[in-house]
Amino acid sequence: MRLSQKFQSNTFRSIASFSGVCIILVFAVVLGASAQTITTINVSGAGTAAGQGTQAYGINTAGTVVGTWKDSSNVNHGFVQSSSGTITTFDAPGAGTGTDQGTAAIAINASGTIVGYYKDSSNAFHGFERTAAGKIATFNVSAAGTGVDEGTFPYGINKSGAITGFYLDSSGVYHGFERSAKGAIATINVSGAGTAAGEGTTAFEINTSGEIVGFYKEPSGGTLIDSGFTRSATGTITTFNVSGADKTFSGVINDSGETAGYYSTSTGGYEGFVQTSAGTITTFDISGSADIYVYGINAGGVVIGYYQLNSGAYEAFLRAGGGKITTFNVSGAGTSSGLGTFAYGINTAGTTVGTYSDSSGVFHGFIRTE
């Protein structure tokens, strides 16, 4: 399960078995980057040592970008950048000021409301939402743990202001949640999800109609299996898995109900997949990749993320609805193992945001347009 990884650097999600799903295997044609404009985002005051800097995670239809920056004392702070380029920084009330504590802004909706989480001085996590006017409200799921690395983790918000995410309880078990625009919180637990530490259910994104996507971890004969799910606006949960996969990670959904993610088989290595609202799954790979990680899908079905080369470095990709894959690197991105370009968010216009780490391991945000 990914816990506080956006406070760290990069990794991602998981999913399960649903009979009757049609699997289509596609060997994608990969093309180099087409005409593009890439603009770097660096928050003033961001640290310049390895692991510090600026990371962009989300973008809305208006082109407003949100993310997190780490200062020279290794404290995290949120930021929002307007479509004109003006950057405003902020901290959630109660955010800690120690090493690796602070605020992480994760997602933004069409109205400009931002959601994320913060780590307090006791190293527990809490959720927050920030309106376009700058008002910040914090919240917790009542059953969330209050110990180190426990707590509430919002990850998605839709047009109406409904928020989804997960919480970690005091026993180390994960549970998904949905918080309505009025503040009512409902817990999401997939039937069959494990109930031991490190097991359970995580929810990540919610679309305009209220459909939620995520994954859960279930025990099976002593082996833990990661399985995906979608939850309808009325609460019906459908589980699924890529055929032959032992781990399926699903965490993004668009307003058409298309979901995307990545999976692995017993032979190892992650590949990507897209699933239609009807349940048809198409898998894809990128030539020369060791692993693929999917982080976003927009209204047009364009999937974005990043992949690891055999050298250990990372490059970003976009996969169009028709299957064409475009790869790209930000100029200045490092090429050593663990460094490179990471795409995290995409809006309806196809503008992509993300992060790159330079040769010194410092993070910088970016916006890519075509």
Image (cartoon, helix red, strand yellow):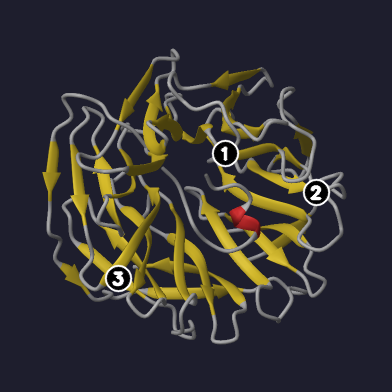
Residue at image position (34%, 68%) is 370
* Separation of marks 3 and 1 at Cα, in angstroms: 34 Å
Q: Are marks 2 and 3 in contact (CB under 8 Å)?
A: no
Residue at image position (38%, 27%) is 230
Residue 215, percent from left and from top: 43, 35
- Observer-side mark, 2 or 3, equals 2
Check disc 3 and give the amino acid type: Thr
The reply to whether residue 81 is visible in this rendering is: no
Residue occupied by mark 2: 123
Q: Residues within 10 Å of mark 3 (few under 14, many from 20)?
A: some
In the image, residue 70 sits, relative to residue 177, either above or below, namely below
Residue 145, percent from left and from top: 74, 32
Q: Residues within 10 Å of mark 2 (few under 14, many from 20)?
A: many
As drawn, the label of residue 198 is 1
The reply to whether residue 38 is visible in this rendering is: yes
As drawn, the label of residue 114 is none
- First of labels 3, 1 by sequence position: 1
Q: Are marks 2 and 1 in contact (CB under 8 Å)?
A: no
- First of labels 2, 1 by sequence position: 2
- In-front residue for pair 264/257: 264
Residue at image position (44%, 74%) is 38
As drawn, the label of residue 327 is 3
Left or right for 326, reference 23? right
Check disc 2 and give the amino acid type: Asn
